[in-house]
Image (tube, helix red, strand yellow):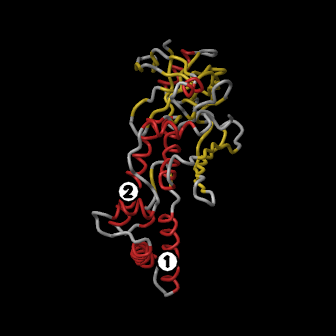
Amino acid sequence: MDIFALPVINGVLPRPRGGVLTGFFIDPYFSKMITLAGKGGEVFLFPFSKDDDTFYPVGIIAVIEDIWAKEVIAGQKKYGLLVKIIGQERGRAKGFDLTSEGIVAKGVERLNFYKLRSEGFPVICGAGWQPQGGYTTFGSDRKSINITIYGFDYESGKRVSITADLKGLVEAEKAHTIEHGIIRSLKNYGLCTAKTLRNAMQRETQELKWSIEIGMAHRLPEFFGITDSGICGNPLTYLASTYLNEEIIKNLKAGENFFDSLERARTKTISRLAQDMEISTNREYRALQGLKKGMKHDDTYEEMEKLKRILNRFPITPWD
């Protein structure tokens, strides 16, 4: 089927089978499209991938429950549309057409993630909740490796999470990389498949290495661990923050002004990190050593079949 489609930039998709979201539309193009679809009409909500700078064709088929006008600026008679949308089913579009009336999702077909998993294509669904972060814990024997991704339910605001034990599948460094890859994929695509996970892991490690290179080259340790998906918690990032604060305080107590204290603290912090964590300051080695030794990330390439086995250990949604 062909239906009007709404791109979602912030990753907010309603939960299938009754999830409710309310959106506010000021742009005339999308307001016109919503009006044409009408109350009771179906729309296709799908992510706009920031990583790929394009539409991602898997989203949520939803029904417009209600539409009403709201004054944007009091007293100036400028209005926007408030729209209440109820999620129905997951779906995939074969393509998109940009018309004068709106964006049209072409050939939308319904998807069942549970059926896909049983057929060998595991998916984690990001609809209905927003991942905020994660952590990896290890058993006393180092054999148990648990990854937890946590966030909040859009409707209730309550904390939700998904957890999996990757015992026998990965080592500690790889688990940390997988944790960040899943979070990035859910935020960027509204789901996580083996393909999107591998792409997200590659981008995440590239950006982590970039943060190390920038931090080392310009003596800015506060840049360590910053990526598009947030700040990576790891030994290097933690020590960078700790050392930087210690050095600033020491310099201020010695009577230096704040800006001189900060500059000297940055240089000293880089020196301490390189020595304590045995990371080279040589441009040829520092980014990779910082990633592996300092951040405990593994950037080696993973086969799709292994990533599928990893995803199979997670629930499809936080509510399963």
| Amino acid, disc 1 | Ile
For image coordinates 48% across by 39% down, the residue present is 307
- Tell me whether the residue at label 2 lies in contact with that at label 1, contact meaning CB atoms closer than 8 angstroms: no
Identify the residue under disc 1: 248
Residue 206 coordinates in the image, percent (x, y): 37, 51
Q: Looking at the picture, which amino acid does disc 2 mark?
A: Lys
Image x and y of residue 85, in percent: 63, 25
Circle 1 Cα neighbour tier, 10 Å, few/some/many (<14 / 14–19 / ≥20): many
* Residue neighbourhood size for the residue with mark 2, other residues' Cα within 10 Å, grouped as few (<14), some (14–19), many (≥20): many
Alpha-carbon distance for marks 2 and 1?
A: 26 Å
Q: Residue 86's image quarter?
A: top right
The answer to which of 244 and 126 lies nearer the viewer is 126
Query: What kind of element bears circle 1?
Result: helix
Instruction: Give the image location of residue 11, x and y in percent.
Output: 53, 37
Residue 79 position by quadrant: top right
Look at 60% across and 55% down and name the residue there: 137
Instruction: Work out whether residue 121 or residue 155 is closer to the camera in this orientation and state it.
Output: 121
> Relative to residue 284, is residue 319 depicted above or below?
above
Q: Nearer the viewer, residue 226 or 150?
A: 150
Q: Which residue is mark 2?
A: 209
Instruction: Indicate whether 121 appears above or below 291.
Output: above
Numbered circles on residues, count: 2
- Residue 282 is tagged as none
- Quadrant containing the C terminus in the rendered view: top right
Rendering coords of residue 277 (x, y %):
43, 71
Q: Which residue is at 65% across, 26% downward?
A: 84
Q: Dot 2: what SS? A: helix
First in sequence: mark 2 vs mark 1 = 2
The residue furthest left is: 284
Q: Is residue 119 left or right of residue 283?
A: right
Q: Residue furthest bottom?
A: 254
